Image (cartoon, rainbow, N blue to C red):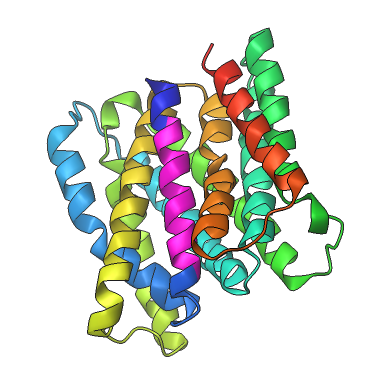
Amino acid sequence: MTEFLALVTAVGYGTSGFLGGLAATRRHAAGVVAWSQLLGLPVLAVGIAVVPAPGVAAGDLALGAAAGLASLLGLTLMYQALAAGRMAVAAPVAGAVGATGPVIVDLAAGNGLSRPQTVGIVLAVAAILVVGAERLADLGDPVVGKALLAGAFVAAFFVALHATGEDAGLVPLLGTRAVTVPLGLLVAARNGAAGRPARSEFAPLAAIGVVDMTATVAIALALQHGPLGVSSVLASLSPAVTVVLAAVVRRERPTTRQWIGVAAAVVAVALLSL
């Protein structure tokens, strides 16, 4: 079940990242983040009502708030990078960093991995890197720089949610949204992007919020009940989804190397599910 939830997260974050990048070409990235977070709250309300939470500690809400801050910073940077028009570059860079950090934390904590899982993690990170390999060496590129920072914040988000108690259910996500919604609106206001969305913008922003919140619910449950490294790596395969969507919808042309990376990601999923 952990692997399935993490894969739901990958599809959700990959899709919301793609949609967020499109929306950020018409509205400041901070506005996209703020309004999509706000419009995704009904999904969280349903999740909290359905998932039991027999034991919630104050620390769980604090960890949720920390995860929220990391999420807000990471999303804003990610949407800015995606809006620059090179989705097939920004998404893989962020995904590779976001996947590697939690694995290091997991290993440092003394949590071992089976041989198939070890091979799967190495292959998954390699796949993410290969998908964006064309520009990985260009660290001076603003798009790559923003994607690297976004990935670091994504890693912090995973680690914070994993630290919440199993009995806390989805309640820690209240702490997450208590940070992301007001701070997101504040940042959007400072950039002149906090105004009510136009009628034509409302549906896309709501779609981003619903998909993103669904993915967040899935990864919260996966991280609470499963290993940090495996869950984070599977969830970080979202760039493969973004690359495929960019190719199909925007007619971006992924290279043969990038398609090989997508195929390697599929093999990694199979190994991590063993």
**Residue 224 in the image, given as x and y percentages of width and height:** 39, 28
Residue 262 falls left or right of residue 122: left
- The part of the chain drawn in magenta is 6-21
Residue 32 seen in the current view: yes
Query: Is residue 247 depicted above or below 114 in this figure?
Result: below
Compare residues 215 and 60 and report the one nearer the observer: 215
Q: Viewer-proximal residue, 238 or 262? A: 262
Outermost residue toward the bottom? 192
Tell me if residue 105 comes above or below residue 10 in the rendering: above
Residue 20 lies in magenta, yes or no?
yes
**Nearest the eye: 170 or 198:** 198
Query: Does residue 132 belong to the magenta stretch?
Result: no
Q: Is residue 112 visible?
A: no
Task: Indicate the position of residue 216 as horizontal and vertical percent values.
Answer: 37, 45
Instruction: Identify the residue at image location x=54%, y=34%.
Output: 232
In the picture, measured across the screen, residue 258 lies left or right of residue 30, that is right
- The x and y percentages for residue 125 are 70, 35
* Image coordinates for residue 174, horizontal then vertical, percent: 27, 50
Residue 36 located left or right of residue 14: left
Q: Main secondary structure of the magenta part?
A: helix
